[in-house]
Each structure stands twice: as C-alpha cells, then as structure tokens.
Image (tube, rainbow, N blue to C red):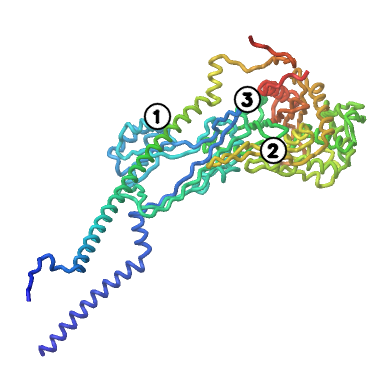
Amino acid sequence: MKKKFGNLRYFVIFFFIVGVVGCILARLFYLQVLKHNFYVAMAQDQHGFNEQIVPQRGEIFIQEKNDIWHPLAISRNYQTVFLVPKEVLDKNEVARALAPLVQIPEEKILEKLQKPGDPYEPLKSKLDDKVAQQIQDLKLAGVYLTGEQWRWYPQDTLACHALGFVGINDNQRQGQYGLEGYYEKELAGNSGFLKSEKDALGQWLLFNDYNLAPAQDGDNIYLTLDQNIQYIIEQKLKAVLEKWKATEGCAIVMDPKTGAVRAMAAFPNFNPNEYNKVGNINVFLNPCTQKVYEPGSVFKPVTMAAGLDTNKITPETTYVDTGSVKIGGYTINNAHNLSYGLSSMTKVLEKSINTGAIYVQRSIGADIFKNYVEAFGFGEPLGVDLAGEASGSLYNIGQNHEVNFATASFGQGISVTSLQMADAIAAIANNGKLMKPYFVEKIVQSDGKEIKTQPQVLRQVVSPLAASELTAMLVSTVRNGYDKIKVKNYFVAGKTGTAQIPNADKPGYSDQTIHSFAGYAPAYNPKFLIYLQMEKPQGIEFASDSLAPVFSDLTQYLLNYYEIPPEQ
Amino acid sequence: MTYYKTHPNSELSIPKRGKIALSLTIIFVLVGLSVFYLMQVNNLVAKNFELHAFQKTLQQSQDKIQSLTVSLTQTRSLNNLEQAAKDLNLVIIEKANYLKITPGFFALSE
C-alpha cells in the first residue's frame, strides 16, 4: 500500500514538473517563435533609431543684368504652435493669452482644449518669428512650439504663374503648376536614412553597426527671367488691365535669338505663399501657356511669312481690296467694312486688311498654308519647361473647308497660346529660326555640378530673306500704322491683333474682343520681343490704341535697360 | 649516498612555471583588452556627444544663416526697393545719351 502511494506521489510530481516545463516551453514558443516579429520590432523601437533624412528642397533664383541672382523660392523654417490639452492647467487663461497672438478667436481655442486626454491639437503654422518668441515668453503649460519647413516666395506675387507653388498632394508636399511642378523631381531631391542605436534620451548613437544613407538635396534652379523686366512688365500690364477693365491678360518678354524667356506676367495673379486662400483654382492656370484663344490679326505676319517664303508674294505685290471676300455662302469683311482699293502687301499689314491675308493664303494654297502654320509651332506644345502647356487647336484647318483657311489667315477659327504666338513672331525676328522657349538658364546640383541649358532650334521655318523682308514690313507697320508707338531713333517691328471672342453657348462671335500686340527691337538685330494680350477690355476698340502705348513704354525701358544705342 | 634538501621554489618544475606565466599573460592580456575596450567605448560615447554638440552648433548656425538670408531677401525685395525709390524720389530713366567713340582717338594721361 505504502509503495503504491509512493509511486503515485512520484508520478504526480513528475507530471506536475513535466506540465510546468511544458507550459514554459509553450509560452517560450509563443513568445519567441509565433510573436518573434512583434517583439523584435518592440525591441528595435526601444533601442533602435530608424529615421528618414529629409532632403532640402532646391532653391529657385531669378537674375538681373550682370549675372546677379536673387532668390525667388526658398525653404524657410517657421514655427508651428500646438497644444497638449491634457497638460493645460487653466484653459481660459491659455485661450485668452493666445487668441490675439495667433489671431484665432478665444472660443475656437477653447474648443480645441475641451477634449479630455487629447495629446495633440495643432493651433497655427507658419508663425512669424516675433509671434513665436512672444508665445515662448508666455511659458504656458501645455503650449508648445515646433519648427517646420515651408516653401517661401520672398517676392510674393512676382512671376507667380511661371513659378507655381509647393502644395500638398496625398499628404506629401509637392510642386504644382509652373516651374515648381515641371521640375518637381530635380527640386525635391532624394531622401536618406539613418539606422542606428539610440540612447536613453532617444538621440541617435553611432555605436556598433549603423547604416547611414545621406539625403541628396534638391537641385538649385537659375532662371532666364530677369527680375527688373518681370517687375516692370507686371506693373504695366496691371495698369492697362485696370484702365480698360479687362478680365484677364498676359505679357511675355523673350530673347528671340535664344528662346530664353525674360519675363512672363499674367493677371489675375496670386500669392504662392498663400495659395490656399485662392477661391477659384483657375487662377493658378497660366494664361500664357495653359489657356488658348483666337489670336486675330497678330497672326497675319505668319500668313505673310508663308507667302514670302514660297515666293508667291513680295512686299510690293498688289491686289485690289473691295472690302470683302465671298467664299461659299460666307462673306468675310474687313474691320469696320472698310475697303482700301489697290493695296500692297506692306499696306495689308499696316492697315491690317483681312482680305489681304485671305489673298496671300489663297495664293499659296490650303495644304502649304497649313504646313507653314504647323511649322511655326501651332497645334502642338512647344515643349517649354512649365507644367501643363496647352497645344492649341488647328482643328478647323484640318477640315478642308475653304472658308476656314480664309479666316485662319487673319487668326480667327484657330486657337493658340500666347507663348506659341510670341514664339512664332520671334522666329520671324530670328531669321526664320523657331527656337524652343525655355525658363531655366542652369541647374546646379547638390554636388556642385552645373548643367547649362543650350538654346535649341526647333526648325528653320522660313528663309532668312523672307524673315528679313517681313521684318521690314513690320517696321513699316509700326511707323505708318501705330501713331501711339513713340520710340524714336530705333527700328521697331510690330503688329497688333484685335480678335473677336466666339460665343460660349452658340455658333458665331460675341462683341467682346481680345487685344494683342507682338513686337521686337531693334528690328534688324533683335535683343527682345514683347508680347502683350488683354481679354475683354471695355470702352476701347483696337489694340493699336490700348496696347500700343504699353508696348512703346516697355520698348523704351528695355532699350535703356540693355543699353542699346540709337540706330538712327 | 648523499641526499640534498631542495629549495622550496625549486619544487615547481619548468613546465609548471610556464603554465603560470601563460595564465598570467592571458589574464594581463584580458585585463588589457578590457581596459582598451572600455577606453574605446568611452571614446566612442564621447565622440557621439561631441557629434551631437557639433550638430546642434551646425543647426544653430544654419538657422542664423537662414534668418540673415530671409532678412536680406526681404530688404532687397522689389516691393521694398520700390518704396525706397519712392521715398528717395528716384525716377525711371527715360532718355539715355550715348557717347560716340571715334576709332583711333583716346585720352593720354600725363
């Protein structure tokens, strides 16, 4: 009996120990095998340091004469104030003290403080340094400041459409519109990381093995834009738009020999520092490159260039203008139904005679005319380095209706961007060579490597002889056609356009117009081209009255700015 | 037959003495390595602290540079310059006279 119980005790103890050991092993298996990843991650979190290194976004610089550069877009540290409501001792006092500094009503701050146990409530970002210091001096419990980098545009609205801005997309900061959007990859740089141990305070400790991949900062971009020209052109454009109560307008200054854009202005504009305050996002669209319009008579030099290049006309070629042309069932008239009788091609440009443009188009034929229009860069993007460039439309002259070709010859029935129109006129100024417009003079990478943009010839559209003959005709146009251009002692070439705006809801055209002006100087060795455009001006009929004086002022300014001595 | 009492030290045979020497050497080497290890760890920790301090200084300097850049940029901004030009009654050049230089003529200084 005794032996029997003795064995039982032995077995009980044995199975008890086996059970306990089994439980321990099972628990160890659970912790070390099944939950392996979880505990490794927890341990890593406790003593490991794994952080992404954010690269510095590249800066954008604008130039002025003599290779002087000024920042146009840089990254700047701002203070952000946030609350930890559970640490706030006197909610009313905190709300009362902060309200005037952050300019948020007391009630709203109190609302944020009411959530019990809330560990984080952001209050206001991009604080002024002075305000941040004042908040810090208050030493309020539960009120903290933290540094945060934001894009800063020191010149506010200057060149805003060309620049674009850095906005938030999918919780990521990203360049949008303009140069910020186009050069996002170059400006953003590449993130790095640091994987190491950390000390009791949570700071990295470069102990044992650590893994460091440094961040690659974004490239710095140096623009072809000149800040003085940009500023003056914005001032002049704004003034003329206000004067004639126009809804929208844009202006471009470029170097016709290289395609470098020296200024690009548009209104209505916006402040990229406060892009989130803009109600209508259409304001972000660049009217010079992202909106299309029917150019009107400013297009006539393109038709004339085709006529001269094919030798179908010369500047002295004449025809008899009767004031209108009948094509199919349509009658096309000159402006104000005027007729000029026997007219030379030079006179066609001077008086902006529609029937003259039709005469040239018919002389060269539909297919050849279309080829020239395409060769001048219309109907497809020019490839400028701005986000979202529009292509315009040559749909009407693809339909093979004679009347469409006739109206296209004086710039109606086709749509173009202002930049396309400016570049086409620049090709005439540049001995018939169409250049690719560009905004970036050089890119300097984070390692100091410099990449300079080389001007690019897209194609030779017309012969140098045809271009030079046309320039002489355009000089004559300025001298004899526009009495409001008063640039003495220089040869200046130019042409206006006053285009009708098509109805939005029905066929035909409204009474509203788009005024434009393209001109360059000195005409036979051009240093700059100016293109101006204004939409729906009120109380003025022709661009020769509205935009010619602005062109005149800008031309005089640029001749002085570039120190170009008189030619005559 | 004559017997001599040996010296107590001489009781250790040569191989035994060698073992002790080896043990002592190992102990010294281990102690030495430990000390060296501690020194290196201490050095590394000190370097880490130094690195943190340098990083802090760098950050402060960068903040200062940025602050100066911001201030300079604001001062040189076109809006600011325009205001300054107005205050000083400056005007835009409207007419420039260019000197004609005749080839072959130049001034000589004494």
Foreground: disc 1 or disc 2: 2
* Visible residue check, residue A312: yes
User: Tag 2: residue type?
Assistant: Pro
Does residue A116 appear left or right of residue A341 in this picture?
Answer: left
- Contact (Cβ within 8 Å) of mark 3 with mark 2: no
Nearer the observer, A330 or A315? A315
Q: Residue lying furthest top in this view?
A: B110
Q: How crowded is mark 2: few (under 14 residues within 10 Å), some or many (20 or more)?
A: some
Nearer the observer, A8 or A273? A8
Does residue A73 appear left or right of residue A429 in this picture?
Answer: left
User: Tag 1: residue type?
Assistant: Lys
x and y percent of residue A299 in the render? Answer: 78, 34
At horizontal 53% and vertical 42% (from top left) the residue drawn is: A447
Work out how far the residue at label 3 is from the one at label 2, CA to CA, in angstroms. 25 Å
Task: Give the secondary structure at mark 2.
Answer: loop
Work out how far the residue at label 1 is from the one at label 2, CA to CA, in angstroms. 46 Å
